[in-house]
Image (tube, grey):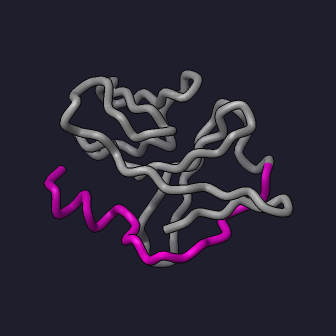
């Protein structure tokens, strides 16, 4: 996937907070796709009760990371096995390909993304 395509599928930084769901909607050890009003997507992960959000599409071939397997804090793209730390966005497969992370805030039983 080209950089232009990847950029259009990633949320723009707008300096605002978006409510995305209730705590518990994403079970521990799982991910979920969050589609924003703009059409952009974020992958939201529950790692032992802590929530993390990253851009949803693997930079290698664009497979949705929210649909991939989570091993602790590492998501492994189901298409070709690229691995990323959902806390930092670090790529363990190719160091020059980190993914973007987004701050997650849990407040009064709700999950918010800061985009």
What residue do we see at 18% from left, 50% from top? Answer: 1
Check if residue 8 falls in the magenta segment.
yes
Above or below residue 47? Residue 72 is above
What residue do we see at 79% from left, 52% from top? Answer: 23
Q: Quadrant of residue 11?
A: bottom left
Q: Is residue 45 left or right of residue 54?
A: right
Q: Quadrant of residue 21?
A: bottom right
What residue do we see at 27% from left, 24% from top? Answer: 93
What residue do we see at 26% from left, 63% from top? Answer: 7
Above or below residue 72? Residue 112 is below
Q: Which residues are magenta?
A: 1-23
Q: Is residue 43 left or right of residue 79?
A: right
Tag count: 0
Above or below residue 58? Residue 55 is below
Q: Position of residue 29 (x, y in %)?
A: 65, 30
Q: Nearer the viewer, residue 5 or 74?
A: 74
Q: Is residue 100 left or right of residue 74?
A: left
Q: Position of residue 38 (x, y in %)?
A: 44, 77
Q: Position of residue 79 (x, y in %)?
A: 33, 30
Above or below residue 15? Residue 50 is above
Q: Nearer the viewer, residue 87 or 74?
A: 87
Q: Position of residue 43 (x, y in %)?
A: 51, 50
């Amino acid at each position: 996937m080209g950089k232009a395509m990847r950029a259009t599928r990633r949320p723009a930084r707008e300096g605002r907070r978006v409510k995305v769901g209730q705590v518990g909607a994403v079970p521990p050890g799982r991910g979920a796709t969050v589609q924003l009003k703009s059409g952009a997507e974020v992958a939201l992960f529950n790692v032992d009760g802590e929530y993390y959000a990253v851009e949803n599409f693997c930079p290698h071939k664009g497979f949705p990371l929210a649909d991939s397997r989570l091993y602790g804090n590492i998501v492994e793209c189901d298409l070709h096995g690229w691995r990323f730390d959902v806390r930092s966005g670090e790529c363990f497969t190719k160091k020059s390909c980190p993914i973007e992370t987004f701050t997650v805030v849990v407040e009064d039983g709700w999950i918010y993304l800061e985009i």
